[in-house]
Amino acid sequence: MAHWRHSLEGKLILRLAGIHALALAIGFLALAQRHYLLRHGVSDTIVVWAFPLFAFAVLGVVIYTVRASLRPLIAASRQAAAIVPGAAGARLEPGRAPAEIMPFIHAVNEALERLDQAFQAQRRFTADAAHELRTPLAILTAGIEALPPGEAVTKLGEDAARMSRLVIQLLRVARLDSQPLPQMQAVDLAQIAAEVGGHMAPWIYQQGREVVLEAPDRPVLVHGDEEALSGALRNLIENAVFHAPVGTEVLVTVLPEGRLSVIDHGAGVPPEHRAQLFERFWRAHGMRRQGAGLGLSIVAAVAQAHGASIMVEDTPGGGATFTMDFPMR
Amino acid sequence: MRFLVVEDEPRIAELVAGALRKAGFVVDVQQSVEDACHALDLFPYDAMVLDLGLPDGEGLDVLRATRVKGHRLPVLVLTARDTLEDRVGGLDAGADDYLVKPFASEELVARAKALLRRPGLALGIVLQAGRLALDTLGREALVDGRPLMLGRQELALLEHLMRRHGRVVPKAVLEDKLYGEGDEIASNAIPVHIHHLRRKLAEAGAGCGIQTVRGIGYFLTEEAQA
């Protein structure tokens, strides 16, 4: 039975039996030699040294066999320790592990498989929820637009737009939670800032504000996920636009050392609010805000996943400056 | 100009078709991959609005089928999914633009018009913004029928901005379009042309202007009609 021979027990029995057989054979030969020597009147010698040697040999074989058998288990533990959320398809390598441990490794791998499936189900749920929520919202938005214009209709339109934003932000949160940043690669902060800024500029203009980008001509490469970073920057700019007075500009800066800032000239953030600012659904009391209190929590989550720091300071002359500092490669 | 709208959700189809009809287009609606492919074989549409999730398959199947048959009609994809993979997948399959649900119908019409404003397409010959019309073949700009005197480079700039009306055109893109490779470009060449263009548009009362996005590029704005 091949299976039996690969177990720790089997290996020990086989190897110890081998040593015993060897010892028996040597003992038998020694006896025969002694018998021969006695017969020819030669003096007798007793090979006492053979017994400790035998004991050492047994000990050595036991230690070697147990260690060699458990080495794959240590390797598997290391693999298990290295598994991170979202690392779909990570499995323990059974290697030459002894048969006693195989069921354990298989059980762990099956558990990982089930976790992967659960992850995928959650991701699918996110996508399905997106579809299910967005279609009725699109119908609602378009339906409101088709109504004859009036004050009530404008308000309804604003409400629907707010709901759309909330749904989109919620889905981003869900996606960040279910699948931490799948596509980490070298991305150019300057390019992301130009794309997001360019995309939002006409909307910002409609809101009566302006956006300005200051970035170096050279790429500013950081290790990250382009979509997540674009989303975070979009949220920072949106936040700044909502808080900047009409007629002012929102300045986006990218510095070569991996620093991204969004600077507005609004009311700024009082120091006592800075700690809670990045918490989900937190909103300043008494402020009529257009957001749902999710945007900045997404920014914080994205920053954390990138090993970047996020902070808010006062803009010289009034306003808030949000800064993300990325670790450089 | 005739649009094909492929969308299985009847309310969305109705609203999309309604918005496009209001903008002066003729619209047909189909609700499945099979019907859409059939309709495309029967009629040379000018553009298509395509939903990604259809009852009998993926909207991208329609897209691939049309591209295989060599139809070059511009396609605007509607989707409820906005992850990068979906966008890249769709653009690989030959979509020209994307709109993520929920969208404003104003945005839909603007994007649809932008698609048709591409060179060689239905709206790509005479571009319109405010009271300004730009004949891309005759190479002349008219404000209320009166010609506007523009330099060759100013006209080219205006054309690019009008083709991408409502969206920012990066400064680097304009430099690429206006100057050949290896040409010496003064760093203020584009801003100087824009400055002249802006003055001429304002003097002629063109009803449109050019907005600068410092550090990024420029976009065309339409003034509210007085």
Image (cartoon, grey):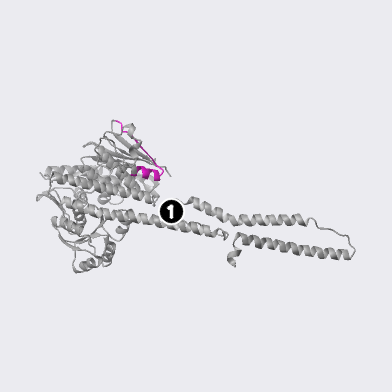
Q: Which residue is mark 1?
A: A87
Q: Position of residue B99 (x, y in %)?
A: 25, 54
Q: Is residue A47 visible?
A: yes
Q: Residues within 10 Å of mark 1 (few under 14, many from 20)?
A: few
In the picture provided, is B20 more to the left or to the right than A79?
left
Question: Mark 1: which secondary structure?
Answer: loop
Residue at 24%, 40% (x, y): give it: A210
| Whether residue B96 is situated above or below residue A261 in the rendered picture | below
In the picture provided, is A310 more to the left or to the right than A33?
left
Residue at 85%, 65% (x, y): give it: A35
Identify the residue at the far top of this view.
Answer: A317
Residue at 25%, 39% (x, y): give it: A289
Mark 1 belongs to which amino acid? Ala
Residue at 26%, 53% (x, y): give it: A134
Q: Is residue A243 magenta?
A: no
Nearest to the observer: residue A159 or residue B214: A159
Q: Position of residue A64 (x, y in %)?
A: 64, 55
Q: Is residue B170 visible?
A: no
What range is drawn magenta here?
A: A298-316
Q: Position of residue A224 (x, y in %)?
A: 39, 48
Give the quarter of the figure containing the N terminus of chain B. bottom left
Identify the residue at the far right of this view.
Answer: A41
Disc 1 chain ID? A
| Whether residue A96 is situated above or below residue A194 in the rendered picture | below
Total numbered badges shown on the rendered structure:
1
Q: Is residue A302 magenta?
A: yes
Q: Position of residue A37 (x, y in %)?
A: 86, 64
